[in-house]
Amino acid sequence: MTALQDAGELRPGPGTTPRRTPPRAVPPPAPATEPEPTRPVVAAPDDLDEQTLVVRAQEGDVRAFETLARRHQVALYRLAVRVLGNRADAEDALQDALLDAWRRIGSFRGEASFSTWLYRIVTNRCLGLLRRTRPAMPVADLSEAGDVLGATRAASPERQAELDAGMTALATALAGLPHDQRVCFVLRELEGLGYAEIAEITGAGETTVRGRIHRARKTLAEVMRPWR
Amino acid sequence: MALTPDTGLPGTAGDVEAHAPVEPLACGRDAAEVWDHAEAGTLDEHERSCPHCGAAAADARGLEAMVGRLAQEPLIPPASVVDRVVGAVLAELRPRDLIPLDSPHGPAALDATAAAAVLRGVVDAMAGMRARSCRITRPSASGGTPGPAEVAMTVTARFGVDLASATARVRQMVVAAGEQALGVPVARVDIEVVDVFVDGAFVDEPGVAR
């Protein structure tokens, strides 16, 4: 640690050495006596790296947390819509999960990535919601299933109708999967995560995750055969 | 799940199937693995010629095509979600640590989080430097009055910045800002450079919106 009295003298103690080796393609460092640019660029929260934002949020910086929330909200919302089957519940789940994340951010220790940590909070929130509303869950409600679908119109009307029907069938079949299977399938096939990360998010073992995903794939492939 | 006793009976509950291993295909290959290979386009010699593997791979490709379409559907949450979250966060903020200010007109204190934000902003405005952690304490002096403040910061620096002179500048700026912007004399500034960055090198998580 350096006291004010020896200002200007950096004593690189343990941990002060930059950890990350810069990539080779980087231009050579400027001379040490480089003049300050005439207009220094202030680093706005949007320019900051994730770890800096996480540390700031942990120290109570709401703007840093807001930036993190905005960066991750799309992926988290996608997960929630696909797990819950409709946008309204997904918005609620996302909102509650982000509030939960703020309240618990002090407990984030960086063992997993921040996105894994957030995915886990959203997943738990969704599963909790599903457990509570299970009896009323309209498993094959086509209008709800269709809610998950946006509109990409490119094919002929006939082909488009066929594709829409196929997509609705897929969304319905997805909604009909056991919750644990659906969560694992969505994380794998729609979010593109690996087995290890899904295991981290769901708290299940990797073998279990693999089994759930495979069973989900088989069920869905069966349903989707007529649309191939 | 742990509460459900294993009765050994075939059940419909997820508990029984959840831990079942993936059943191998008739040819003995691991069905999940064949599926992964089909999706990744890395089927081996056997998997390409075996009818059992072929059927599994066809299922995988058929489903993948539809799932791919589903994955492309844009799903963007309304901006109001994060707005509501931030509103709720701000509404429930309570002052945590307070830094006493020297005031001749009665007690005055400054929220440490706000003070830290001011000092971080000073560092962020410097070329090639960004503040990460910032902790400010003001230990009592001998007479019970608040002594000068002590600041501990971690910073990241742009690759190529002369760290010795940059940290010296950080120290000067923090001392000046403490006294001028916060009204708190600063006796000590500990600075730790914890990372270096390259402009534009921060890669976002997949699927994030900026």
Image (cartoon, helix red, strand yellow):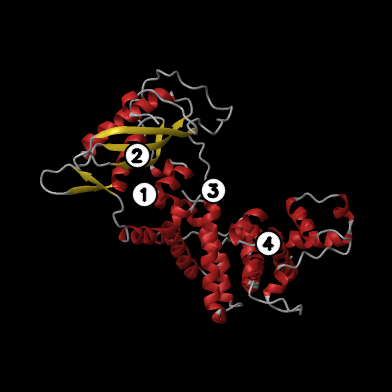
- Of mark 2 and mark 3, the one earlier in the sequence is 2
Which residue, given by chain and number where applicable, does mark 1 sit on? A61
The image quarter containing residue A78 is bottom right
Question: Vertical placement of A29 versus B17: above or below?
Answer: above
Q: Residues within 10 Å of mark 2 (few under 14, many from 20)?
A: many
Q: Is residue A172 left or right of residue A58?
A: right
The image quadrant where one finds the N terminus of chain A is top left
Residue B29: x %, y % from top left: 85, 58
The answer to whether tags 3 and 1 share a subunit is: no
Q: Nearer the viewer, mark 3 or mark 1?
A: 1
How far apart are the two marked residues, 4 and 1, measured between alpha carbons? 36 Å
Residue B152: x %, y % from top left: 36, 37
Q: Is residue A20 left or right of residue B23?
A: left
- The residue marked by circle 3 belongs to what chain? B
Viewer can see residue A86: yes
Residue A62: x %, y % from top left: 36, 52
The image quadrant where one finds the C terminus of chain A is bottom right
Which residue, given by chain and number where applicable, does mark 2 sit on? B120
* Tag 1: amino acid: Asp
Which residue, given by chain and number where applicable, does mark 3 sit on? B205
How far apart are the two marked residues, 2 and 4, measured between alpha carbons? 43 Å
